């Protein structure tokens, strides 16, 4: 509420935040109020008020509900110091002695004296933040210095007005702490909820903020380092307590004492767990206690309410994404694609009598280090072979066709165990299957999705390869036979495929895309049934608890990035094949979590590698909890996020897809981006940069290039272009391009006119949501009747409406005459692929690839609104369409 003694009211206009030309979020108009009140001075931002009080009584910092006046967040001691006194940390706290309004800022000041006699002067200037919340600019100046005090850190904490034990809350520290961190390795940051302090260096976080969600009432509080400038001249790999005035990184986290609170500490210290010296509880950094030395940094406080932890993660991440407004540099993705496929082809050879790619290559000189063949995951032998096969046919490169076919033949003819489970890792010296390594479901499905793509490619060319198809079916049959009663699959199985090796079930969803695609390819409903059962298990055990665990076979069964990204892929596949909206809901939740692993800010890195001196952490994403290693694997999710954008029309997913399309490619060498590597296409497999210095494996692995090329190829095959900026800007209306309306002439596109009725194929009723009807209507030249026709392969096309942005679709995967059609989110499935066969006089038939039926003027209609369905092809005028 406003008070009678209000000084002024300042209104803000709605704010529009963009990333690389695309809208990230249209932030609400946040009215800014500055007022003086009987109980202190305040700012108002949205539905919350910030009140400061001075003196020995009352709460110095209060965030309260503007409607009710009830306190939501409080802090008793806003002025906090941690003093280095010899080898001991000493906490000293204080309150504001003066508060007041200065223009549109609310300022609190006060001095804090240490036991040793040093005096520090605080000045905190609060203001209403863009998009809601409150920003604070803090300075801490050394007024008097005592020899007893060698270093200092300042700290700000805030927590709920009625705090409960830390274990009652759910937390997000991106890349580090999810919910209550139940699935993290021993020694991981925030792995013990009984620790008094959980502070993390901000460089370990893809965005520097921490959020706390109260599941009882839905209250969220977040604390962020605003405008971070992480830097340090000292050895950040040292476990010693170092003091230097040029250390400018912060720590963020939470603490249990004196009550549950969030904290920012400047400069950063890490504990009670740390990744610098794991044998010790703390690694500390401080600034010097020198008269005149001043700290200067900013933080942001935000309160919000959300329905559950998943919603809180989404809301907090997007808010801080918009606050950071990540830079995105345009990358020539065609060069990245070309370099990625070419480097795969360049390393393909024969070792130990078997064709394949080396397991690893040295950087920067490009020499082969180790040779062994892993079908998926980091080896990616089969997906790489498919990419070479596809590229060879598409771009007339016969050598790539040969290399791809040889690798695919080797796996199809040799990999299956008698049970049907593929063996996934082959050693060339001595030749044979790696006996001590189990078959991980993740690795098997990676590889077998590749073989199925190759099968589909060869069938579309009229030359199906029976051994490849049989190989895929054997695995499909094994999955049907070995599915658990609850619909799940185990994390890994023994090499023979006769029993489990690791009985964790978090990876069940990895089997879903392969099973659904195999069912569509073969027509065998058993595979679809198994996929749906696995999907139901994943809904209950992965989606609902947001338990994205065990995505990477080379880490423990822990919370990691790839688990959430693969869940996104699986739930999208279920949505594509069933049209059930709850699968899209699950895909969004998984995508929201997967985003939080990718860096959306940057800091300088000391490195001998040009890639990191030039780009810092741009484009990198953390791999898993338990360490701060990072890589560019998230590049492989580009296609999934662009599909998610198309399915939801949510512009944030497009903004995130742009980050993956561009930033994730920066540390790859390609023409125009020299990085000192021996060949274009090379990049480093995994690195550590969180200590502001380079540490890496100095290796390229095949997955690095597959992650780039596979998503780009899928974009090209589904949408006709691998550049999402082109796709989002034209022809489909993007978030910055208004859609045509019924009174707007259609942009250049194609009309599809029936020979019998002389009516045009039409987005009936102008609907733009999946499931929209397609009928015939009087030709009128409007956007509803404008269609983009994009080649897919071998005479098949995707047909996409300009108004809705949706694709002409065989509804419910029908195969009988009379099967309906609809518009649906474009997904590259065969139900959205149509063969155009010219029949003369500028007319063609449109044949659905899945059903083999022709698009038909149902019941020979001639009136506007006449139905369109599929029917057995019969060469009658009702199936003749003029595309012009």
Image (spheres, grey):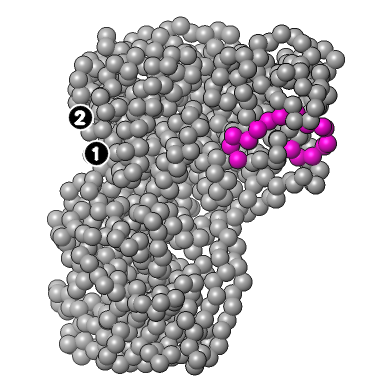
Mark 2 residue crowding within 10 angstroms, few (<14) / some (14–19) / many (20+): some
Q: Is residue 721 left or right of residue 259?
A: right
Residue that label 1 marks: 557
Inter-mark Cα distance, 1 to 2: 10 Å
Q: Residue at x 24, y 83 (%)?
A: 93
Q: Secondary structure at mark 2?
A: strand
Nearer to me, 303 or 877: 877
Q: Residue at x 34, y 14 (%)?
A: 477
Q: Residue at x 37, y 8 (%)?
A: 413
Q: Residue 567: where, in percent of width, then height?
A: 39, 37
Residue that label 2 marks: 502
- Give me the disc on residue 130: none
Q: Quadrant of the C terminus?
A: top right
In the rendered view, tell whether residue 108 sits above or below residue 846: below
Range shown magenta? 769-784
Residue 48: within the magenta? no
Could you tell which of marks 1 and 2 lies nearer the N-terminus? 2
């Amino acid at each position: 509420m406003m008070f009678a003694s209000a000084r002024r009211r300042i209104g803000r206009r709605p704010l529009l935040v963009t990333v690389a030309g695309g809208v990230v979020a249209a932030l609400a108009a946040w009215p800014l109020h500055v007022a003086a009140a009987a109980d202190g001075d305040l700012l108002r931002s949205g539905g919350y008020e910030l009140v400061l009080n001075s003196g020995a009584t009352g709460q110095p910092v209060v965030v309260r509900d503007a409607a009710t006046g009830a306190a939501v967040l409080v802090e008793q001691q806003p002025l906090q110091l941690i003093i280095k006194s010899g080898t001991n940390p000493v906490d000293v706290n204080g309150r504001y002695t003066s508060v007041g309004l200065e223009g549109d800022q609310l300022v609190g000041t006060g001095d804090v004296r240490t036991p040793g006699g040093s005096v520090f002067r605080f000045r905190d200037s609060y203001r209403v933040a863009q998009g809601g919340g409150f920003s604070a600019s803090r300075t801490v100046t050394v007024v008097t210095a005592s020899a007893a005090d060698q270093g200092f850190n300042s700290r700000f904490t805030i927590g709920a007005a009625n705090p409960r034990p830390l274990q009652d809350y759910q937390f997000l520290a991106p890349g580090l702490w999810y919910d209550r961190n139940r699935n993290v390795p021993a020694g991981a940051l925030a792995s013990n909820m009984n620790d008094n302090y959980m502070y993390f260096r901000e460089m370990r976080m893809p965005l520097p903020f921490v959020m706390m969600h109260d599941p009882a009432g839905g209250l969220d509080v977040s604390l962020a380092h605003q405008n971070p400038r992480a830097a340090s001249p000292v050895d950040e790999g040292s476990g010693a307590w170092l003091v230097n005035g040029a250390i400018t990184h912060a720590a963020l986290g939470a603490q249990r004492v004196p009550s549950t609170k969030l904290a920012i500490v400047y400069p950063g210290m890490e504990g009670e767990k740390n990744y610098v010296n794991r044998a010790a509880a703390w690694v500390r950094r401080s600034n010097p206690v020198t008269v005149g030395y001043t700290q200067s940094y900013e933080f942001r406080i935000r309160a919000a309410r959300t329905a559950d932890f998943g919603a809180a993660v989404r809301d907090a991440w997007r808010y801080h994404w918009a606050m950071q407004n990540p830079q995105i540099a345009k990358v020539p993705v065609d060069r990245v694609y070309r370099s990625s496929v070419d480097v795969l082809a360049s390393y393909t050879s024969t070792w130990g009598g078997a064709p394949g790619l080396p397991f690893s290559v040295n950087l920067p000189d490009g020499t082969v280090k180790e040779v062994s063949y892993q079908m998926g995951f980091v080896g990616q032998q089969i997906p790489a072979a498919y990419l070479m096969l596809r590229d060879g046919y598409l771009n007339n490169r016969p050598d790539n066709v040969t290399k791809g076919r040889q690798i695919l033949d080797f796996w199809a003819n040799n990999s299956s165990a008698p049970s049907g489970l593929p063996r996934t890792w082959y050693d060339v010296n001595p030749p044979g299957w790696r006996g001590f390594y189990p078959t991980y479901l993740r690795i098997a499905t990676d590889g077998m999705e590749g073989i199925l793509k190759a099968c589909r490619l060869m069938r579309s060319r009229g030359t199906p390869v029976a051994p490849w198809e049989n190989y895929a079916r054997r695995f499909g049959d094994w999955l049907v036979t070995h599915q658990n009663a609850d619909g799940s699959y185990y994390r890994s199985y023994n090499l023979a495929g006769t029993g489990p090796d690791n009985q964790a079930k978090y990876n069940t969803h990895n089997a879903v895309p392969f099973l659904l695609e195999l069912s569509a390819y073969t027509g065998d409903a058993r595979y679809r049934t198994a996929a749906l059962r696995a999907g139901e298990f994943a809904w209950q055990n992965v989606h609902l608890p947001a338990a994205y665990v065990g995505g990477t076979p080379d880490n423990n069964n822990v919370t990691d990035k790839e688990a959430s990204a693969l869940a996104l892929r699986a739930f999208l596949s279920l949505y594509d094949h069933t049209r059930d909206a709850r699968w899209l809901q699950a895909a969004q939740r998984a995508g929201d979590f997967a985003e939080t692993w990718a860096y959306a800010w940057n800091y300088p890195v000391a490195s001998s590698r040009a890639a990191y001196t030039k780009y810092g952490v741009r484009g990198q994403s953390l791999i898993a909890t338990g360490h701060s290693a990072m890589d560019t694997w998230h590049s492989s999710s580009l296609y999934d996020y662009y599909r998610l954008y198309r399915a939801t029309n949510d512009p944030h997913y497009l903004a995130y897809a742009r980050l993956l399309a561009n930033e994730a490619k920066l540390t790859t060498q390609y023409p125009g981006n020299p990085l000192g590597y021996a060949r274009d296409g090379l990049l480093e497999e995994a690195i550590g940069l969180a200590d502001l210095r380079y540490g890496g494996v100095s290796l390229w692995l095949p997955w690095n290039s597959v992650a780039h090329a596979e998503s780009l190829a899928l974009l090209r095959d589904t949408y006709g272009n691998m550049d999402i900026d082109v796709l989002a800007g034209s022809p489909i209306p993007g978030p910055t391009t208004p859609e045509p309306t019924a009174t707007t002439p259609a942009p250049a596109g194609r009309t599809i006119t029936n020979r019998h009725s002389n009516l045009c194929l039409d987005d009936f009723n102008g609907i733009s949501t999946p499931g929209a009807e397609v009928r015939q209507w009087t030709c009128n030249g409007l956007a509803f009747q404008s269609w983009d026709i994009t080649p897919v392969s071998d005479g098949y096309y995707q047909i996409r409406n300009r108004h809705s942005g949706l694709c002409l679709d065989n509804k419910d995967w029908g195969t009988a005459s009379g099967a309906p059609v609809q518009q649906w989110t474009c997904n590259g499935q065969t139900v959205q692929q149509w063969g155009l066969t010219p029949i003369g006089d500028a007319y063609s038939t449109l044949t659905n690839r899945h059903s083999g039926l022709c698009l038909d003027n149902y019941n020979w209609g001639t009136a506007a609104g006449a139905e369109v369905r599929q029917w057995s092809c019969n060469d009658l005028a009702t199936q003749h369409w003029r595309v012009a």
